[in-house]
Amino acid sequence: MAASDAPDRRTGRISVHPRGFGFVADEAEPTVSAFVTPPDLNPFLAGDLVDFDLVPSGDGRFTARGLALRERARSVLFGPLTVRRGRPFLAVDPQVGNTDWPLSGADGAGLQAGDFLVARVDGSAARFERAVPPERAGVERVIARYQLRTGYPPHDGDAVAVSAAKRRDLTVIPTVTIDAPSTRDIDDALAVLPAGPDGALRLLVSIADVDHAVRAGSPLDEEARARGTSVYLAGGEVLPMLPTALSEASLSLLPGEERAALTAELRIDDEGEVTAVDLYETVIRSTARLTYAQVATYLETGDASGIPEPVRPTVAWLRTAAARLSAARRGRGGVDLLREEASVTVDESDAPIELVAHESTPAHALVERLMVAANEAVARWLVARGLPGLFRVHPEPDEDAVAGLAAAAARFGLMAGFGRRLSPRGLQALEAQFAGTPLAPAMRTVMGKALGPARYTVHPGLHFGLAAPLYVHFTSPIRRYADLCVHRVVKGFLCGERGQVADDPALEAVGVALNGLARNADRAERDRLRMLAAQLFSTRVGERFSGHVVAARPFGLVVHLAGAGVTGTIGVDALPGGPWRVDEHGQALVGPSGTWHLGQAVEVEVSGTDEDAGRIELALA
């Protein structure tokens, strides 16, 4: 065989399409993806690392041949039991694999066809591990689909002693936490020292000192690093980064309990500029646990009856601090890209009973403004001292992205008028056109996709969406490993360590891993929300909704349902006048009879649902 005829052997990762075929993305050249036929896909699972021959198939496309397993990516499978010719099989999640797997170890377990099971991958088969009650099937499906971790190494979570040695005692300063009533892992507390004669006030943002209880390199720390973040699944299921004995008890900033903390003290002048920041280890005691609803009522009406008397002045001064910071922030630009999604209330059997669209109150805005200010201040503090950090970087959009966002806005009837470059103020001006209008949820969805995600890196840079020259995550170490990494850098410096290197390659590797773990957790959270929404909407087939198109895909249109906080799909087969194709900008479906584009208002009705896929199927009303 001539050298030019030799197979183009590559290595890549498998992805599985629910329709039964797959793709393999080249590890060395991620833009190259090859189609995998259903028969060739049978032995593999999503995420598997394989060797394959890259075979051109015309029109710039490729097919993968001669696939050979190099590394199995997952160890756990989920699905219902099925029986074929008297033999048990596991019907694998179609987003994980495309065929049933032979099942072993289920003899004598009293199982019946249709029972939901968790199984271990055993070569090319599945080994029974445990049965799952039907009401838990959705949660277990998501856990297995995204390989979420559920166990912890041995730990002594109840024995976290707090020593005042080398810590500033802030227990006499009125301090509050502000969270949802359901929050159990409270990791941030707020206090404020009133303005002095020069008009400056001092904001104290105290964060639970997780490193005090979870030492770097310990088995529990390694587990937290492998998880990367807590995962909050719709319906109330939480997979915490740290065991609940820590996250909800001995580390949580509960009222009346002394806790070790790391405090960022910000001096805020009367124009909202943070003129100084100091970081130090502290002992604090939360005076009162407040809810967003209590604080929102006070901010909106002045009614402080739900707020204990000793902390009413504290809340009033926190409002002043947030107002000053907001005034300064408005001059910089940027937006708050909040998720326009919903929360789901479930009954005792975990069945969804209500879907409530996300609503941000003035209390949410106050807490967010203070936390963002603390994160920015800590980032500046690190850079000023030449210290490493896992900076949260959100780059300025390139020219194509700016043009795409402007075009998408125009389809919503919004004239952006961007130049070739987009500034944070320009982005803020666009937001001002739709903020508070019925367009806001759909437009925020489109804007978030156009701007792309932020990422962790040791290389300091702009957070464009927040208009922050420097930014880190510092305020949630119980929930995010990146924050814990930043705490350890700060504490190391405070303890006299001077050998930390700004561009630490080991810390950069941690950041790269955390980026992937955060994306995975985000997908899991969205999938579970969509599953519950689909289950709830199964009782609403035939109901009509108004909505806006927020994405055009080869399979159809994605529509944001007004007031529901969720999206549904109009399949291409349900659109008359086809065939339809996605235009070159990815913003419309184009066909012989016209165009369906982003921002287009539509009237739809629910035509069906698929709970396992988390899909609400729509038809034009």
Image (cartoon, helix red, strand yellow):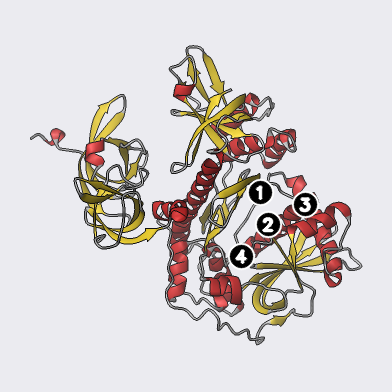
- The image quarter in which residue 313 lies: bottom right
Give the residue at mark 4: 382
Residue 372 is labelled as 2
Frontmost residue, 218 versus 303: 303
Q: Position of residue 89 (x, y in %)?
A: 26, 50
Q: Which-is-in-front pick, marks 4 and 1?
A: 1
Residue nearest the viewer, comparing 387 with 236: 236
SS type, badge 2:
helix
> How busy is the neighbourhood of tag 4: few (under 14 within 10 Å), some, or many (20 plus)?
many
Q: Are marks 2 and 3 in contact (CB under 8 Å)?
A: no
**Residue 493 visible to an observer of this rendering:** no
Q: Amino acid at mark 4?
A: Leu
- Mark earlier in primary sequence (3, 4): 3
Q: Badge 3: few (under 14), some or many (20 or more) residues near its Cα, within 10 Å?
A: some
Helix or strand or loop: what does disc 3 sit on? helix
Labels in figure, total: 4
CB of mark 1 within 8 Å of CB of mark 2?
yes
The residue sitting at 86% across, 63% down in the picture is 305
Q: Which residue is mark 1?
A: 466
